[in-house]
Image: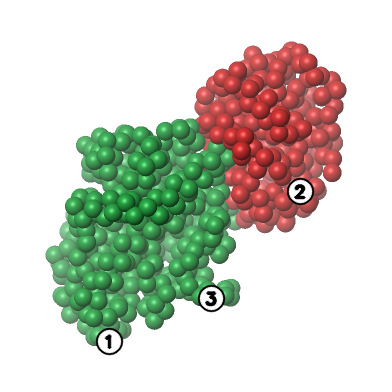
Amino acid sequence: MTTRIDTRFAALKTEGRSALVTFLMAGDPDAKTSLAIVKALPKAGADVIELGMPFTDPMADGPTIQAAGLRALAAGQNMIKTLSLVRTFRKSDDTTPIVLMGYYNPIYVYGVDRFLVDAKSAGVDGMIIVDLPPEEDGELCLPALSAGLNFIRLATPTTNDKRLPVVLANTSGFVYYVSITGVTGSAKPDFGKVAAAVTRIKRHTKLPVAVGFGVRTAKDARAIAAGADGVVVGSALVDAVKNSLDRKGKATARTVKEVTKLVAKLAKGVRGAGRKN
Amino acid sequence: MTVRQPNSFRTGPDEHGHFGIYGGRFVAETLMPLIHELEKAYAEAKADPAFQREIDAHLKNYVGRPSPLYLAERMTTHYDGAKIYFKREDLNHTGAHKVNNVLGQIMLARRMKKPRVIAETGAGMHGVATATMCAKFGLKCVVFMGAVDVARQQPNVLRMKALGADVRAVESGAKTLKDAMNEALRDWVTNVSDTFYCMGTVAGPHPYPMMVRDFQSIIGEETREQIMAAEGRLPDSLIACIGGGSNAMGLFHPFLDERQIEIYGVEAAGHGLKSGKHAASVAGGRPGVLHGNRTYLLMDHDGQIEEAHSISAGLDYPGIGPEHAWLADLGRIKFLSATDTEALAAFQLCSRLEGIIPALEPCHALARVADIAPTKPKDHLMVINLSGRGDKDLESVAKHLGGKL
């Protein structure tokens, strides 16, 4: 199977540059603004869109993304609305890959089979489920692959050479390398170590490797892009949303603009990295 | 749901940590290598007689085991039915059953050469036990506690601080036990190389539910010997309160295959099961995935976790251990519940009839004894796990009773 993710990474490889992968929480700060933000992302320079599925108990996320999830839930976001956001986006953009990211429980409760059918038909290309390691592949990973959706796995600094093949076995789309041991938005990665880790992972797979956690600025993005096929930025963008809100936590005229402004800067950073391959 | 009855209820979990459909290892990749390392270290320790000998010595000389199996004569007369025994876990050092598990895990942390221990706590009893053992063995201790619980369980916060622990008030989410657990997991993801996560109940990713059960099974094993010595036969019924379910599993597990023994688990019904403000995961929840395992959870139709409510901070958790979930489906454990009000009445009655001030957690079990004991014949032997003492609860009980203790 070929998904929009495969097509996009292949095209960027020809272009000789890394992908900018942007993470935002679906429904943050509200469904309408969230849709406006997502619609504006490709033009601002996002190559792959990650959409968080809000969850009350995000155990691998730092305070920024925890708060974004709670904002979205408070505004009434749920799985049906998240899938509907994707469906609406697809009406005007049939090429930008969309990856849903989150935790297993909302999917399990929605029903795995129903979720895969609805996600595929909405135009979702893949998913990253933080609390489904390879040991639980039977739950969602294998059914997702049969349904024609990519299951993107996280590799971390604790994933050693012995374990990497286990992690990569049923991974498709791309590999998401978590640059630090820690939660999202917490610490700045050591760029040298990240480059070495990406090289190590590439010895085990032909899939593109994107790097995330702790990437905040155009300069960070540029540094990471020099060695990786993709750069994921999440907490910094979520912060841009949060900082644009009014005192009551509602969207303002600046909300979409603040996000696209940062995306444009990050895209410039990624494009300036000057990759060899 | 019809579930095929197994030949034995005591063989779980399977190698993937499953009890039927429950359990498992639903954690972030960063933690997976640590989970495997822990599983291996525990298997090795379990096979090493020196490990058990060391634990036994500390249980005897430091914790004060065996804890007595006490015949509650006045309560027996009061209900005029079953002969009621209390398993006195409240008499352990630190005041609850929690220490049995913590001792085992801290000995394991030492074997694994982990200098830093983290724990989550609700009422503070697991936090106090962890802080105590870390003090005894010279380990660094960090306890995560929801900010709401920090406010309502001040005596235990002070105890932990006196013992040298770093108590972190968790401000995220609803600021109670589940959020403390989230924060402990976030800490573990961040400090992977030097940190041991000492989990307080029979939940979390495999091998925790099995390991905590094994360490708590001393409760049931002692009960068996003690009741044989006192009565010359096994009990007819066992009853214990269930939040995550470690005190209950500790009492029940050694007796699961004696199928004639009735086993009752009592969940916290808070303001009542229909009020929506309760902590009864089996009675009011359904299967879901949280904190590393699949089990019964309180959640909304979108899979968002709901806040539990109970007067007892130790039962205030929206889930239950996966082995309990499995035994509930099989019908081996009969699940009941008790409200805040019923627990308070049991608190007063037990204090005055027996001269024992129980923690609010086992008061939920005592509340159901009030219904069950009178229906039983006088030769029916009933064992209640009196899992902790009530000193920590006096202030909140006084508040709820309008100052009239």
Report how far apart the C-alphas of labels 1 and 2 lie in the structure: 60 Å
Residue linked to disc 1:
B377
Q: Colour of chain A?
A: red
Label 3 with label 1: CB-CB less than 8 Å? no
- Of labels 3 and 1, earlier in sequence is 3
| Element assignment for label 1 | loop
Number of other residues with Cα within 10 Å of mark 3, as a class: few under 14, some 14 to 19, many 20 or more? few
Report how far apart the C-alphas of labels 2 and 3 lie in the structure: 34 Å
Q: Colour of chain B?
A: green
Q: Is residue A160 toward the left or the right of residue B394 in the image?
A: right
Q: Position of residue A111 (x, y in %)?
A: 67, 57
Q: Amino acid at mark 2?
A: Leu
Image quadrant in which you'd find residue B256: bottom left
What residue is rendered at 39% in x and 77% in y? B258
Number of other residues with Cα within 10 Å of mark 2, as a class: few under 14, some 14 to 19, many 20 or more? some
Q: Position of residue B387 (x, y in %)?
A: 28, 60
Q: Residue B334, can we see it?
A: no
Q: Is residue A181 toward the left or the right of residue B174 in the image?
A: right
Q: Is residue B15 toward the left or the right of residue A101 in the image?
A: left
Q: Are marks 1 and 2 on the same chain?
A: no
* Chain letter for the residue marked with disc 3 in the picture: B
Q: Amino acid at mark 1?
A: Pro
Q: Position of residue B228 (x, y in %)?
A: 25, 76
| Element assignment for label 2 | helix
Which image quarter holds the C terminus of chain A? top right
Residue linked to disc 2:
A145
Foreground residue among A36 and B196: B196
Q: Residue B41, can we see it?
A: yes
Q: Which label belongs to residue B5? A: 3
Image quadrant in which you'd find residue A103: top right
